[in-house]
Image: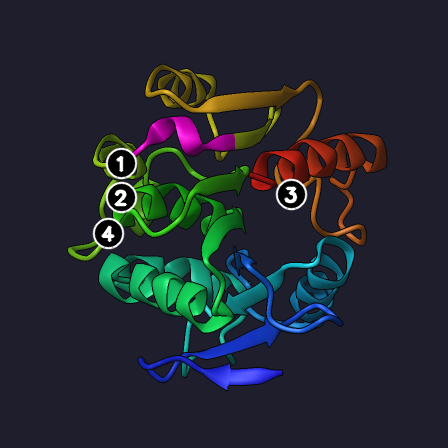
Amino acid sequence: MRIELPSGTAAELVHPPSGPADRGLVVIPDVMGMRPLFDDLVADLAAANGWSVAAFELYPDREHLDVAERLAAASSLADDRVLGDAVAAADATGAASVGVLGFCMGGMYAMKAVGTGRFDRHCPFYGMVRVPEAWRGSGQGEPLDAMAAGDASSVLAVIGCDDAWTPPDDVDALEAAGATVVRYEGADHGFVHDASRPAHRADDAADAWSRVLAWLTP
């Protein structure tokens, strides 16, 4: 069901068939934000795992922007608002313990969420380890700095070795910071979460999901 977070941001919240769960999960979408792909993912994760799951829009009141416009506006995003929404979404699940995962830009914010102390597990899928130059703005902090402020060992990062958004030096820095990194040879950006994309790799995606779901299970 659609809910509104205290900031006014729209979110999707789904409880398992048994009702509100003790275990929660927040999903942070890719740059294109909330759409049927993520509505379905939230519902599937809730039903399959018995978790209460919530996801929210990265660009509230700007949902009409296309991908190029969203990328151009990335520097206007502020960590206080995005991470505040992530924490509010966690609270909305009503769960005693909550993990977070995210894709692409959402993966970057899943790493930044370490600094909030709200989540016990963090699973970025091909999240940017360093904020891209074009995305930098006064409200954007660095993921590695946020991880240093919390428990970096709570991070399991899924990385494609052919992904220009996650250069090898950045991935090495992520691992050195204390994260567990799973690298997929030959995989490009976005190879897991959207089967309609040319980059999708079914076998690698299945393996990545298996690892992530195990990591998210305390």
Residue depicted at x 52% and y 31% = 157
Residue matched to label 2: 115
Residue lying at the far right of the rendered structure: 203
Q: Earlier in the sequence, mark 4 or mark 1?
A: 4
Which secondary structure lies at badge 4?
loop
Residue depicted at x 51% and y 76% = 11
> Which residue type does callout 4 highlight?
Gln
Q: Between 88 and 35, which is closer to the camera in this rendering?
A: 88
Within-10-Å neighbours for mark 3: few <14, some 14–19, many 20+: many
Q: Is residue 187 left or right of residue 107?
A: right
Quadrant including the C terminus: top right
Q: In this view, does 194 lie to the left or right of 26?
A: right
Circles 4 and 2: CB atoms closer than 8 Å? no
**Mark linked to residue 190:** 3
Residue lying at the far left of the rendered structure: 138
Front of the two marks 3 and 2: 2
Q: In this view, does 10 lie to the left or right of 142?
A: right
Query: Where on the picture, by quarter, is residue 40?
Result: bottom right
Q: Residue 188's spot in the image, x, y percent?
A: 65, 32
Q: Between 90 and 202, which is closer to the camera in this rendering?
A: 90
> Which residue type does callout 3 highlight?
Gly
Residue matched to label 4: 140
Q: Is residue 151 left or right of residue 185?
A: left
Q: Residue 42's spot in the image, x, y percent?
A: 66, 64
Q: Residue 144's spot in the image, x, y percent?
A: 29, 32
Circles 1 and 2: CB atoms closer than 8 Å? yes
* Mark pair 3, 1: CA separation: 27 Å
**Mark linked to residue 150:** 1
Q: Is residue 155 magenta?
A: yes
Within-10-Å neighbours for mark 1: few <14, some 14–19, many 20+: some
First to last magenta residue range:
151-156
Q: Can residue 15 be seen in this view?
A: yes
